[in-house]
């Protein structure tokens, strides 16, 4: 907290008056970052209600993958890894405010398409996990290790499109509902 106060150019007492502890400060920072992430996902300015489902997925996927490939996100996750080792209770707060919320947002989009009969799913969260995995693949490791980062960034649109095609083959209207488990 002392380092944060110094960087923010405020006293520690001012910082503690606003944030009770490191967890509260972390949660506030995560909420601010989620606003950026959700803007990147296109959730703050949704497209027209009759936009094709694949276009909605494309905007969401491209936005989140560009965010995750940004230097800001890579640096944040690196710093977060060290903090979680020292403060394990931050893990659940990070999950709820970050990846868990992104997963829920994607599941909501997928559930909406299922309710309109555009896809056949058993579980929107499972479908969101599958799609996100198709988008991300090993790119998170490449970015964290700085191995082929430029190629990862250059391939985001292609990765997202390929993931959507595979997702729609499995969950699309032609699906029988008997997808393998």
Image (tube, rainbow, N blue to C red):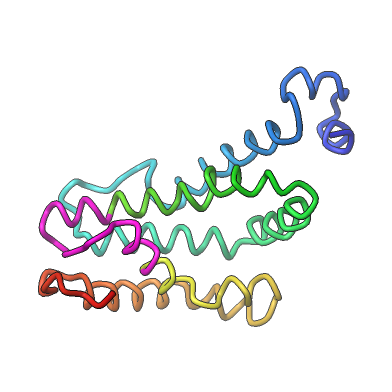
Q: Quadrant of the C terminus?
A: bottom left
**Where is residue 164, by image quadrant?**
bottom left
Image coords of residue 56 (percent x, y): 29, 57
Relative height, residue 176 to residue 4 (above, below): below
**Where is residue 158, by image quadrant?**
bottom left
In magenta stretch: residue 55: no
Relative height, residue 6 to residue 131 (above, below): above
Q: Give the camera-side residue of 53 and 24.
A: 24
Q: Give the camera-side residue of 126 and 156.
A: 126
In magenta stretch: residue 114: yes
Q: State whether the magenta stretch is mostly helix, strand or loop.
A: helix
Q: Residue at x 16, y 64 (%)?
A: 120
Relative height, residue 152 to residue 103 (above, below): below
Q: Going by the image, does 139 lie left or right of 2?
A: left
Outermost residue to the front = 181
Q: Give the camera-side residue of 21 and 157.
A: 21
Q: Which residues are magenta?
A: 110-130
């Amino acid at each position: 907290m002392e380092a944060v106060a110094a960087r923010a150019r405020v006293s520690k007492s001012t910082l503690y008056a606003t944030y009770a502890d490191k967890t509260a400060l972390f949660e506030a920072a995560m909420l601010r970052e989620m606003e950026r992430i959700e803007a990147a996902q296109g959730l703050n300015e949704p497209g027209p209600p009759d936009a094709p489902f694949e276009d909605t997925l494309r905007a969401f996927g491209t936005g989140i993958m560009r965010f995750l490939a940004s230097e800001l996100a890579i640096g944040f996750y690196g710093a977060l890894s060290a903090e979680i080792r020292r403060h394990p209770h931050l893990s659940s707060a990070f999950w709820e405010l970050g990846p868990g919320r992104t997963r829920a947002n994607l599941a909501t989009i997928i559930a909406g398409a299922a309710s309109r009969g555009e896809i056949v799913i058993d579980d929107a969260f499972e479908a969101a996990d599958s799609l996100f995995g198709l988008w991300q693949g090993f790119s998170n490791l490449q970015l964290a290790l700085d191995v082929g980062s430029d190629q990862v960034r250059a391939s985001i649109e292609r990765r997202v499109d390929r993931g959507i095609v595979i997702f729609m083959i499995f969950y699309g209207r032609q699906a029988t509902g008997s997808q393998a488990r």
